Image (cartoon, coloured by chain):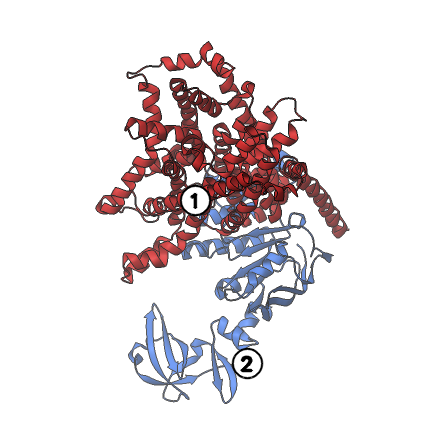
Amino acid sequence: MVRTMAISNELKWKLFKGLGILAVLLPFILFLFVPLIYSIWYINPFYMYTFFNTQYKIKIFEFSLENSMMQGLLSALCSFAIGYPVGIIIGLYQFKFKNVLLTLSYIAFFMPSILMVFAFIEFFYLLHFYNFFGLYGIILVNTAFNAPLIAIFTSSSTDHIPVSLIYSAKLLKANIIKIFRKIYFPYTYESALIGFILAFIYSFMGFTAPLMIGGTSNYTMEIWIYILYKSFFDVKGAVTVALLQILILIIPVVIYFVLSSKSMYLSNLSRKKEKLYSKRDYKKSLGAYVLVSLYTLFISIPFFTILYYTLFGSGKLSFSPFLTLFSNITTYKIGIPYINVIINSLFFSSIAMFLSIGISLIVLYFAEELTWIKISIVLPLIVSPIVLALVNYMFYINIFTNVWPIIVIAQTMVSLPIVSRLIDNSIKMVPKNLEYSAMLLHTRRSDIFFKIKLPIIKYTLILSSMLSFVMALGEFGATFFIFTPLFTTIPVSIYEFQSLRDFTLAYSSASILFVITFVILYIVFSKEAYKWQS
Amino acid sequence: MAKLELIGITKKYGNWKVGPVSVTLNEGESLTILGPTGSGKSTLLKIIAGIEIPDDGKILVNGKDITNLPISERDIGMIFQDYSLFPHLTVKENIYFGIDNLQLSNNKKESLFNKIIKALHIEKLINKYPHQLSGGEKQRVAIARSVVMKPSFLLCDEPLSSVDSRTREELRSELKSLQYTDHIQMVYVTHDHLEGMFMGDKIMIINDGKVEQVSSSEDIYIHPKTPFVAWFVGLNVLNLDNKKIAVDPLDLEISDEGIIEGHVISGRYIYNTWIGYVKVGSQIIKLQSYSDQSGYINKDVKIKIKKYIELQ
């Protein structure tokens, strides 16, 4: 009797779980697989051969692949060269503004790309250095984005090194090189490598930086997909390059997935509250002092430049550009009042945030143990924002009367891989014994999830929601591909103003995006936020 | 009160396995599973709890097969070594977490709560969070949270190994008193043979996944079945005339009439007992005496066996 009841409960759960998994897969089927397959069907897979029949298209492909590879590798290498030692120092030393530095690093990584590019352009103009455009500029911007990512990952691993290991090594008379080789390196190389791969993927898929400062000779595959579709009206060419880009990115994404799944130290983006290896005065180490100072200066450039141009753009302190931004001039230039631009941005980002958090949670509830579902959720990482926009636009343009749902879909799919990995890794850290204890206290499966697991990871949930919001808010590539004037967002407006050579409006719009992003990220990553963590 | 039967329980992990384990715990009896680290005792506990499913064998409670019953449907409580308190809930909320799952009136729930916090002396802690408690306090709360559910069996997975020795003694006696007052039957896992013998009516000694002996605590000490059991409960295992024997350290004496020759390598007289270690060949044996024998340290001696148990 008991066994029959148990089997019937198990069957009910399996049925429920099956339906849940179906619900989880639905967004991927609808917004990734179906549009992708439709695009392939649309161009006819055999066309891929004919694409290479034209000499100029072969050239386009060769150039763009070479540029993507070059920018991906050089940016990842530069980011690693700066991020890894800085990460070790942040993890190793205790210094006064460490939390501020880490917060700045997070903000730099999650900063909207258009804002970063814009800030660097203005910074170099300010220094009267006009050779910033081209490959070096792209690498610089990509490094400003990705070095903080590698630094964060590395410092997080360094934080997890048991202090007893360091003390034991020192008591055994090991010198600093041996300690690094035998302790620091084995503990940190994995997360630094994950950061390196992500830096490569993001730079390979670069859109904003090569578009704004690269010039034609530095256009990546991502930009050529855009140009082929939007300027040459070559749908088949665009889809072919998009598919080839997906195929190329499969290998790094698989390596990223495997490494990040087994890495113990990237549980979440939170830091340990107590320092394991504290009270070392980093000022005594000149190298560390110089490196940290240079790094701080480097990642602060965008913030100070934008603040400077916003407040002193006209030569003296003035807020009048903001009044202009909200006047009819803007409506005349971009087609809608600026307040609508803000509303659009907030509205799309909010929906994208709820969708990505909701999908991540449903995945964890129904399919915590199913790796293949988790792989599906990381798949959008292979599919770049422009490709996501392209395939969804092609498929849904005939279904939706407006383009805004397609913008929301693309923004959701862009933030989903990062958000879901964050939540997944964080939930894995909840000790299994807590779950068993709750089960032994006759707690239902749903209560274990909602009353135990979610409250324990509440900080990561808040963090993930905010990050997802900020990523959607600053998303430029996909939105730029899809938008119509009625659905202009803040990042798109910055580009539009810049294209119209109206830099005052561009600065003002950039500063609004900067303020919103900075305030959210600062609240999330500042020290106070840790009070939320149990 | 319930009867627990494990029949031929086996669990494989690659080339290593636990079992087959068969043991019956009659109504009112408690069992201690004793063994070194990695011997499979916690695995056995997890199988009883339902956290692990055995590859073979059955678990019966009062004759009912619960082998495949989900964890939450078993009438079993468990105390973990790491306490496993919900970190985001106060002590009160932790204890109520289980009570709320019982079909009882609010008054009844409150009375259960008040009774258990009084029994475990945690009245002043109820509004605190786990991170504000000491190890001993945490374990009291964990015990309260499990015991309040009045489970048929309380499984204890080395619950006192993370607390200091004084608190360990206190908690041990309080857990034992719960066996008498609340008639809670326990399956207690430990590697400390003295603690194990104190807690269980029956002792199961397990080594490398295999059951070495199951009997009463007294019987295990007087009639160890294997050299491992004798060694694990603190007896010296020696070879005498091609026979394996077990000798209590108190039954060995330094004397010229002794038949074993050895060298005293260390010793200490603490309060009223001398504990010494003698190297015999490659083996080190332990001696105990009520008189101070420190003068023999670093000297060759002869050891007399006053009494011994012949092993199979």
Specify few, some or many for label 1: CA neighbours under 10 Å numbering under 14, 14-19, or 20 or more. Answer: some
Q: Does B254 sit left or right of A286 as displayed?
A: right
The residue beneath circle 1 is: A70
| Residue A394 % position (x, y) | 63, 31
Which of labels 2 and 1 is toward the front? 1
Inspect this view and state whether residue B111 appears.
no
Distance in Å between CA atoms under marks 2 and 1: 76 Å
Which chain's residue wears label 1?
Answer: A
Residue at 45% across / 11% down in the picture? A329
| Residue A366 % position (x, y) | 64, 42
- Quarter of the image for residue A108 reads top left
Secondary structure state at the residue bearing disc 2: loop
Q: Does B190 sit left or right of B105 as displayed?
A: left
| Chain in red colour | A
The amino acid sitting under disc 1 is: Met
Q: In the image shown, does A453 or A368 lie closer to the viewer? A: A368
Q: In the image shown, does A337 or B197 lie closer to the viewer? A: A337
Q: Does A56 sit left or right of A128 as displayed?
A: right
Q: In the image shown, does A443 or A171 lie closer to the viewer? A: A171
The amino acid sitting under disc 2 is: Leu
Secondary structure state at the residue bearing disc 1: helix
The residue beneath circle 2 is: B311
Which chain's residue wears label 2?
Answer: B
Residue at 32% across / 46% down in the picture? A89
| Residue B266 % position (x, y) | 33, 75
- Quarter of the image for residue B110 reads top right
Q: Colour of chain B?
A: blue
Q: Does B44 sit left or right of A529 as displayed?
A: right
Vertical order, B133 against B268 (above or below)? above
Q: In the image shown, does A484 or A259 lie closer to the viewer? A: A484
